[in-house]
Image: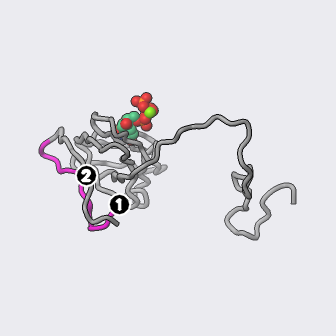
């Protein structure tokens, strides 16, 4: 891993709240907080503001990922996980939270860490229109073609 961090400009739209921050050295995700109190009923979703806008360098994307602890403990996730923040986006980063718990509401307080931002390089593709694709070993097998949980399981109706 490159030791020099990538410089990302952050505009704090709420100066009482912190910049995105990594909990440990080497972490991939920098935590984002909510600027508002919000309660999510079971099954409910909400677009939650984080109080930050960023300017990514060209060729980078920021992905908004759920936090696994909140998912495991409370069933909190993100509807469009991972959310995609484009390099050209200058608006506030928002997180489309969802409460997957069937029974318990989730109460979030302003300043709570609700999601994490992972910054990555990406490739831009030139999409080339062709009539046929090169062959591959997998071919068009998918959607469980290799079996289920155990590799011994029968995997399709042809067997
Ligand atoms: O979790 C997210 C996902 C997206 N965005 C912002 C940044 C992103 O650059 C913009 C557009 O996101 P996306 O391309 O995923 O949404 P879309 O429905 O395709 O909207 P658009 O037509 O604006 O591209 O919304 C967020 O703040 N949080
Ligand atoms: Mg889009």
Q: Residue furthest left?
A: 16
Residue 80 percent location from the top left of the image: 46, 42
**How would you rate the neighbour count of disc 2 (Cα within 10 Å): few for under 14, some for 14-19, many for 20 or more?**
some
Disc 2 designates what residue? Answer: 112
Q: Is residue 13 visible?
A: yes
Q: Report the mark closest to the observer, 1 or 2.
A: 1
Horizontal side of 73 relative to 110 (left or right) equals right
Report the residue at 12% width, 43% height from top.
15
Label 2 sits on a secondary structure element that is loop
The magenta segment is 15-27
Q: How is the image coloured?
A: one colour
Label 1 sits on a secondary structure element that is loop
Q: Mostly what secondary structure, the magenta segment? A: loop
Q: Check mark 2 vs ligand 1: CB closer than 8 Å? yes or no.
A: no
Quadrant containing the C terminus is bottom right
Report the residue at 72% width, 48% height from top.
134
Disc 1 designates what residue? Answer: 28
**How would you rate the neighbour count of disc 1 (Cα within 10 Å): few for under 14, some for 14-19, many for 20 or more?**
some
Q: Residue furthest right?
A: 159
Magenta stretch contains residue 57: no
Report the residue at 42% width, 56% height from top.
71
Horizontal side of 76 relative to 53 (left or right) equals right
Q: Quadrant of residue 151?
A: bottom right
Closer to the camera, 100 or 125? 125
């Amino acid at each position: 891993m490159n030791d020099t961090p990538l410089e990302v400009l952050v505009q704090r739209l709420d100066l009482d709240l912190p910049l995105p921050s990594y909990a440990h050295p080497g972490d991939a995700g920098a935590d984002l907080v909510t600027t508002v109190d919000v309660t999510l009923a079971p099954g409910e979703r909400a677009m939650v503001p984080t109080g930050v806008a960023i300017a990514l360098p060209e060729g980078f994307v920021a992905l908004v990922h759920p936090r696994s602890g909140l998912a495991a403990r409370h069933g909190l996730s993100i509807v469009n996980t991972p959310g995609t923040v484009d390099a050209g986006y200058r608006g506030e980063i928002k997180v489309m939270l969802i409460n997957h718990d069937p029974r318990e509401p989730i109460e979030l307080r302003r300043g709570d860490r609700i999601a994490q931002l992972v910054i990555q390089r990406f490739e831009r593709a030139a999409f080339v229109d062709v009539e046929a694709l090169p062959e591959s070993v997998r071919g068009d097998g998918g959607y469980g073609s290799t079996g289920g949980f155990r590799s011994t399981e029968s995997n399709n109706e042809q067997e």
